[in-house]
Image (spheres, helix red, strand yellow):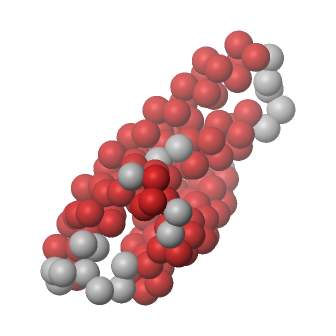
Amino acid sequence: MIRQFMSRQFLVFLLTGGTAAAVNFGSRILYNTWMSFSASIVLAYLTGMVTAFVLARMFVFSRPSHGTGKAILLFTAVNLVAVLQTWLISLGMLHFLLPALGVTRHAPELAHAVGVMAPVFTSYLGHKHFTFR
């Protein structure tokens, strides 16, 4: 299992995923000017997800065993798990953990950043073994 995370493919996944995470994070700040924190997390995740699919297909998993349509469906399924992880962790940190620690400065950004990073390993395994196998 550890060997899967010690590969060039995982490194490229981290780089492309990092780019998608930056899109996710930045768009959440923008969306949050028009909607609630909770809703902006979900919409930003979708924005990052489109970015992630395009980059993963181009640079990480370039030879899937099935067509683009099926890859999009599987990508969405894997990311439904990831967005739930992101949303739960972000809200949990913002409303419970950070206040308990006395953190108020940049709390939404800190909570969302940790939430975005949380599903890295589960997403990689899901995309490697299902989406782009």
Of all residues, the one furthest to the top in this rendering is: 100
Q: Residue at x 43, y 86 (%)?
A: 58
Q: Residue 15, position in %: x, y?
A: 60, 71
The answer, for residue 58, to whether it is visible in the render is yes
Q: Residue 41, position in %: x, y?
A: 52, 47
Q: Is residue 35 above or below residue 133?
A: above
Left or right for 129, reference 84: left
Q: Nearer the viewer, residue 125 or 112?
A: 125
Quadrant of the image for the C terminus? bottom left
Left or right for 34, reference 69: right
Left or right for 43, reference 107: left
Q: Residue 30, position in %: x, y?
A: 65, 58
Q: Quadrant of residue 61?
A: bottom left
Q: Nearer the viewer, residue 11 or 72?
A: 11
Q: Residue 101, position in %: x, y?
A: 76, 17
Q: Residue at x 53, y 44 (%)?
A: 118
Q: Quadrant of residue 78?
A: bottom left
Q: Residue at x 46, y 32 (%)?
A: 88
Q: Residue at x 28, y 73 (%)?
A: 132
